[in-house]
Image: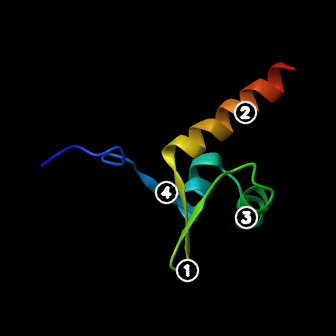
Amino acid sequence: MEPTATQGVHLNTVEEVMERLRIGRSTAFELIGSRRLRSIKVGRRRLISEAALAEFIEGLDRDDAS
């Protein structure tokens, strides 16, 4: 089987992101709604890629350093 660009990509649920960032549900959806945290919609579910989560955290580090 040929490897693809998306092979090995992990998608997190909103609940997993809430737990990892230690934030509440409304804060998570506020970040998604403001597009500070990128997400995709699959059916009725919102999912956040590891890359989007890492990008958000790196952005926090940059904001904190300013």
Residues at discs 1 and 4 in contact (Cβ within 8 Å): no
Q: Residue 54 in the image: state x and y as whole percent.
A: 58, 37
What residue sits right under mark 1 in the picture? 44
Quick one: label 4 or label 2, which is nearer the N terminus? 4
Q: Residues within 10 Å of mark 1 (few under 14, many from 20)?
A: few
What residue sits right under mark 2 in the picture? 59
What residue sits right under mark 4 in the picture? 12
Q: Residues within 10 Å of mark 4 (few under 14, many from 20)?
A: some
Q: Residues within 10 Å of mark 3 (few under 14, many from 20)?
A: some
Q: Residue 18 in the image: state x and y as whole percent.
A: 62, 57
Amino acid on which the number 1 mark rests in the picture: Arg
CA distance for labels 4 and 2: 18 Å
What residue sits right under mark 3 in the picture? 29
Amino acid on which the number 3 mark rests in the picture: Phe
Quick one: label 1 or label 4, which is nearer the N terminus? 4
Q: Give the colour scheme shown.
A: rainbow
Q: Residue 56 in the image: state x and y as whole percent.
A: 67, 40
Q: Residues within 10 Å of mark 2 (few under 14, many from 20)?
A: some
Secondary structure, mark 4, is: strand
Judged left or right of residue 63, residue 39 is left
Amino acid on which the number 2 mark rests in the picture: Gly
Secondary structure, mark 2, is: helix
